[in-house]
């Protein structure tokens, strides 16, 4: 699935402990995570920090639309799904949430677990600072030197500056363009150079 034009994520990791429920303690840990490697690193960190906990339940949602969750030994659907529902309810992407539980000796039942895990995840996310991300796309622009002024005028009007440049037989610029501006930038560069510029979108 393609990345969304813009999305919200957490600015930094956040932790929150809720009041014990029938003796069981719950701590939520939420953090930005742009890929599965970052998710795995946070999960491992949580397990190492709280090795004595009975359960390390988690869920994550990436900007490309992928999601996963784990009940980590709790009854099916009682932990991972409620955590994921909170991530989706907060409309966040590139985020992982881990809820750690120390068993207090009294079973909470599936309904109680859903409320506990979902509630802890939700309150943890409530504590986080949310930022909006606009994904960027790499564009390569190859143009004649006679078109330098026209190209620079387009870039200046868009507030764009090359991230790299090469000066050979023709000028080659590499740009990082916000996802939702790509079509406009391409059209303006074509018009400004009367189609002479070679425009390539890099993966």
Image (tube, rainbow, N blue to C red):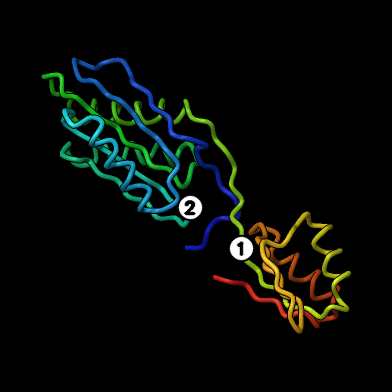
- Residue at numbered disc 1: 137
- The answer to which quarter of the image holds residue 131 is top right
Residue 43: percent from left, percent from top: 29, 41
Q: Earlier in the sequence, mark 1 or mark 2?
A: 2
| Residue at position x 17%, y 36% in the image | 74
* The C terminus sits in image quarter: bottom right
| Residue at position x 58%, y 47% in the image | 133
Image height of 12 relative to 15, above or below: below
Within 10 Å of disc 2 (Cα), the crowding (few <14, some 14-19, many 20+) is many
Helix, strand or loop for disc 1: strand
Relative side of 143 to 109, left or right: right
Between 8 and 44, the one lying in front of the other is 44
Helix, strand or loop for disc 2: loop
How many angstroms separate mark 1 from mark 2 (CA)?
Answer: 15 Å
Image height of 169 relative to 189, above or below: below
- Residue at numbered disc 2: 63
């Amino acid at each position: 699935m393609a990345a969304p034009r813009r999305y919200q994520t957490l600015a930094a990791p956040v932790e929150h402990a809720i009041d014990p429920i029938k003796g069981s303690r719950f701590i939520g840990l939420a953090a930005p995570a742009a890929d599965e490697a970052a998710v795995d690193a946070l999960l491992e960190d949580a397990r190492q920090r709280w090795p004595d906990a009975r359960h390390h339940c988690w869920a994550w949602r990436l900007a490309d639309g992928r999601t996963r969750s784990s009940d980590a030994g709790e009854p099916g659907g009682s932990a991972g799904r409620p955590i994921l529902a909170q991530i989706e309810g907060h409309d966040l992407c590139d985020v992982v949430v881990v809820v750690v539980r120390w068993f207090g000796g009294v079973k909470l039942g599936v309904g109680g677990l859903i409320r506990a895990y979902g509630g802890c995840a939700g309150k943890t996310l409530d504590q986080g600072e949310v930022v909006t991300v606009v994904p960027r796309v790499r564009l390569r622009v190859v143009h004649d030197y006679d078109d330098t002024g026209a190209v620079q005028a387009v870039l200046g009007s868009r507030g764009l500056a090359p991230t790299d440049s090469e000066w050979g037989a023709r000028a080659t610029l590499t740009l990082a363009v916000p996802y939702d501006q790509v079509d406009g930038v391409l059209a303006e560069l074509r018009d400004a150079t009367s189609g002479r510029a070679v425009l390539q979108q890099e993966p």
